[in-house]
Amino acid sequence: MLDDESTLARDIIRVFILEHWARFYYAKDKDGQTVLSIPAEVMEKIHESHAELVPMLEETNGTVLTYEESCKNVGAFVCRLLDGPKYAPGVVTKAMDSKPFKIEMHLLSLWLKGHESYLDAHDLSYDDWLEMFVNWKQMDQVKAFIEKLQSTPPPTTNTANSVH
């Protein structure tokens, strides 16, 4: 199906991590609504190291955040960024329903839950989050868990139309 589903899953998860990072630190209450408010200097810093990801932040910065809109925006951005320019057309959509991607999303969820108090106490950069996530996945206990997940048969439910 895919030449390297794991590499594609990692490329996709970077975008999801960015979106979670942005919401985690820069979601602000404004008149009873949650608005993404990323300062210009933070946007510039992201542009220096991850220019390809900045358009997603630019599109959502200053907008009201809802779960539905976040799902739609991230999914659409992932497809624009990767489906065609980096991978064959249609591959990214299929990858979002692949076992490697589902494992990456599960790991991200576990990592966020397990590190929430630390992330809350420190103003970390997107690069810090990426480094911490990658390093966490290199821990022996996490590696063993990943191996278990990889050896488990995939669920029979089709989630091709889901993003988050």
Image (cartoon, rainbow, N blue to C red):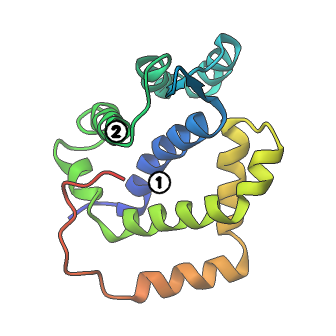
Give residue 82's quadrant in the image.
top left
**Which residue is rendered at x = 38% and y = 53% of the image?**
8
| Residue at x 47%, y 63% (from the top left corner) | 104
Neighbour tally class for label 2: few under 14, some 14-19, many 20 plus, Cα within 10 Å:
many
Estimate the x, y position of residue 58 in percent, counting from the top left: 47, 17
Q: Residues within 10 Å of mark 1 (few under 14, many from 20)?
A: some
123 with respect to 50 (left or right): right
> Where's the N terminus, which quadrant?
bottom left
Instruction: Name the residue beneath numbered marker 1.
Output: 10
What x and y, as percent, mark residue 80? 28, 31
Q: Is residue 107 left or right of residue 82?
A: right
Q: Nearer the viewer, residue 154 or 29?
A: 29
Foreground residue among 106 and 68: 68
Q: Dot 1 lies on which element?
A: helix
* Number of the label disc, if any, that sits on residue 78: 2
Q: Write the residue at 69% across / 39% down.
A: 127
Q: Residue at x 69, y 69 (%)?
A: 138
